[in-house]
Amino acid sequence: MNASASIGRTGPRTRWGRLLARRATARSAIAGTAVGILTLGVSAVLAASGTAEATQEVRRAQAVTQVLNDISVQVNTQDAALREYLATGGTEYRGEQLAATLDSARSGLDWLQQHDAVDRVELDAIRGAYADYSRIVVEIMAQTERGAKVQGYTELAAPAFAPLRDEVLGNVRRNQEALAGYLADVDRRADMLQTVAEVTILIVAVLFAVCALVLVGYQRRAERQTARRLHEATHDPLTGLGNRAMLHDQLDTAVRHGYETGEPFSLLLIDLDRFKEINDTLGHHTGDELLVEVAQRLDDGCRGDDVVVRLGGDEFALIMPTTPDQPEAVEAGHRILEVLRRPIQLSGLTVDIDASIGVAVYPRDGADAAELLQHADVAMYAAKRRHGGVAGYDASLDEGDASRLSLQSELRQGIERGELVVFYQPKVDVATRMPCGAEALVRWQHPARGLLAPDSFIPLAEDTGLIDLITIEVLDQALAQIARWAELDHPLPVSVNIPARSLTDDTFPATVATALQRHGVRPELLTLEITESAVIADMMRAGEVLGELREQGVNISIDDFGTGYSSIAHLRDMPPHELKIDRSFVMKMCENSRDETIVRAVVDLARNLRLRVVAEGVETESALQALDDLGCHEAQGYHISRPLPAADLTAWLAGAGAGSGMANSAGR
Ligand code: C2E
Ligand code: MG
Ligand code: MG
């Protein structure tokens, strides 16, 4: 699986998007929507109550009009009866009809008064007119009954009837007008409410849309956050590769799939060699750069359905679903190694890296994820013990792995209990073949496993920081031994190997000075061997520490010269006293002309820079002779002597002094 691009900022990018994402916008939209809905509700209530009130008013006006009309009809009827009465000369029949109409409008007028239906003054005017008219009618009837001569209608009743009729009709008209005015008012109010409702609906619709957008925005943000959290939980932030959690997940899936289909797959664990050294000396930033580059190479190198993850530190893992057996997986491991071994440019330096790869195959090496991982780990450490390369899991490796786990705590105890012993491998002057120094090489006298070579515990010590204790212990023992040989009148310079991290430790020069003083040893009898990588890695800090050591008079030797980093430029800036040609070139220099050329070049380089040059790994007389011909100053190797316990070297020195020093092979 490819490294996922890390998820960047997930917030909205546009101005509108940002505005919508603001909490204040959401709150305002919700509050606005609530106010809008409330306004709509109030409008509806007002409209409903307005309608009810209007209906009631119309009914009332209709009733008033009806009553006024009735009054109008009643007085007109009365007037018509009067005229008939007068026209017939006051017959009894007409008189009864007229009498029946008397006071007929009173109940209507009382109703108007009770219901306060017309203006008081208006009502009084009607009542007054009606009373006048009624009085005249009664008077006419009385006169007629007495047989008196009654004047004509026009002279007597008409002047009283006209104001009464006008008053009644005027009130009918005014009542109609008032109703029309009221209805016009109701219409205006209804129009206004409708406008308010329409505008409110529009605003609510907009606010509702804003609310919806805000909600959708929140939901999207929540989804993005969930996705980011999931990504963070399953990915390594530095390299963008999956992390340990993803490996477990994918491994479980692969095992399930394998169980169901019977298809095997491979798991590779990859651990970088010397990463800690690079991290310690070049700094974390460069270490990070290296990890990113390694991740990129792994990612580029794997197939589409492979899963590559970083487990932490310098450890990576690869699930290869379509690599079904160990030979094929080991071959894939070699291909990966090839890619990783290509030089890497870091902070202006060319760095070579190497890795150890352990292979486990499902179901052959494990039935579940945990077992597969454990066995890939065992295989990886087996590869590490062999100094890199690829190792497939094998049940016989388990023993070695168990011992590795207990090694760390045992080593700490071993150092405290004084189980570290220092062997010395002599160096001879190539021209005279006389001993001219020795290299202090640590061994661990393990109570159960016997004498252990440094390769079996120094890498672990470097990984865990225990190397500092070892450096101090070896320095102390070596200085004590130098003092003893000086007392015996065999003053012999001794070289002590110093790990890279000591050169970035400001207190290291003081530690050396104190140790020299404690043992009363002259500083020129002590040489500190450092690897090229340590010097190159952090020139600034290493330069300061080395400068202080040089000032004390201690010699500096570049060990394993020719491997690791290209350092010729730095030899000019910070010259050591000595170059030590790596044994890999010296051992085969007589058979391999390329090796011989490198040895020759280093010897020439050292001599031109006026540095002493030492060849280590001299296993044959012919190599020693060839070094002599090339002008190499000093030689160290099994042909001269294997590393020996101090007492044996003392004896050897006595023998070498007598001229029989070559080819002791008793030590290891
Ligand atoms: P080195 O510093 O390059 O030491 C030389 C190694 O080459 C020694 O291995 C020595 O035994 C071996 N050697 C010497 N002559 C020959 C030869 O003719 N042929 C072959 N094949 N090998 C030869 P040793 O003692 O196993 O040490 C291995 C490495 O362990 C050392 O390499 C050094 O890097 C590290 N080491 C040893 N002692 C210490 C120590 O006290 N402190 C630290 N930091 N590292 C140490
Ligand atoms: Mg050395
Ligand atoms: Mg060496």
Image (cartoon, helix red, strand yellow):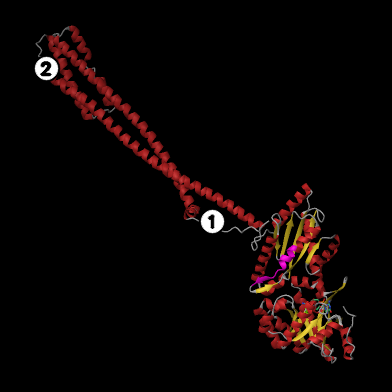
Q: Which residue is the site of mark 1?
A: 11
Residue at position x 77%, y 71% in the image: 459
Taking the magenta stretch, the answer to whether it contains residue 340 is yes
Locate the C terminus by quadrant: bottom right
- Dot 1 or dot 2, earlier in sequence: 1
Residue at position x 13%, y 19% in the image: 158
Locate the N terminus by quadrant: bottom right
Whether residue 371 is visible here, answered yes or no, is no
x and y, in percent, of residue 642 in the image: 86, 80
Which quarter is ligand 1 in?
bottom right
> Is residue 340 found left or right of 70 in the rendered image?
right
Badge 1 local density, few (<14 within 10 Å), some, or many (20+)?
some
Quadrant of the rendered image containing residue 302: bottom right
Mark 1 is on which residue type?
Answer: Gly
What is the spatial separation of the Cα atoms under label 1 and label 2, in whole angstroms? Answer: 98 Å
> Is residue 386 found left or right of 54 in the rendered image?
right
Residue at position x 58%, y 59% in the image: 8
**Please, what secondary structure does the residue beneath circle 1 have?**
loop
Q: Which residue is the site of mark 2?
A: 154
x and y, in percent, of residue 613 in the image: 76, 85
The part of the chain drawn in magenta is 335-346
